[in-house]
Amino acid sequence: MNLPQNTPLGKLQLIEVYHYYDGPKPFSCRSNSGQIYLVFWLGDENNADNWMYVPISLNRFINARAGSISLYDVCKKSENDFVWILKASFQEDKHSAILIKLCADLKDDELPAKDSYLELDIQTLPAIEEMSPFVKEKVFFRT
């Protein structure tokens, strides 16, 4: 998969692919500066694939992965009130175009379904008391 590299999005690295059909459809990536994006394929037209890159904070990303936030709300209620629309040309001699689109201007046909969620297993550590049945007392400091 070729992620755009010379755009205002920064140098991107893939984090996860959530659905794959003739290429990744929703997926996540991160820029070298740490900005996380949830990315959605919008279809193709005029010899280009159209992608929506939604900037997302780490906390909101974790909640989206856990299914606490719908993918519709991730896009329509982006924390920055905008998304990036990337038009990736199929022709190697043509550059991709990228533009900012305000969330208020997004149409429902550009967004995931209102009832679409990611529901990934989130690995958490057990509480310290549960980790060792052999600990009988709590010792904070010994001299």
Image (tube, rainbow, N blue to C red):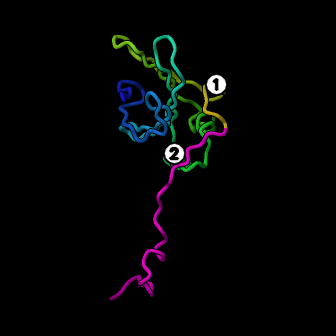
* Magenta highlight on residue 121: yes
Please tell me which residue is depicted at 56% across the width and 35% down the height of the picture: 80
Task: Look at mark 1 in the image and give the residue it sits on.
Answer: 109
Mainly helix, strand or loop, the magenta region? loop
Position of residue 142 in the picture relative to residue 85 (left or right): left
- The circle on residue 130 is none
| Label tally | 2
Residue placed most toward the observer, 110 or 76: 110
Task: Look at mark 2 in the image and give the residue it sits on.
Answer: 61
Residue placed most toward the observer, 52 or 26: 26
Residue placed most toward the observer, 8 or 116: 116
The picture places residue 52, in percent across and down from the top left corner, at 52, 28
Please tell me which residue is depicted at 47% across the width and 61% down the height of the picture: 124
The C terminus lies in quadrant = bottom left
Residues rendered magenta in the picture: 115-143
Please tell me which residue is depicted at 50% across the width and 21% down the height of the picture: 50
Give the amino acid at mark 2: Phe
The picture places residue 134, in percent across and down from the top left corner, at 41, 84
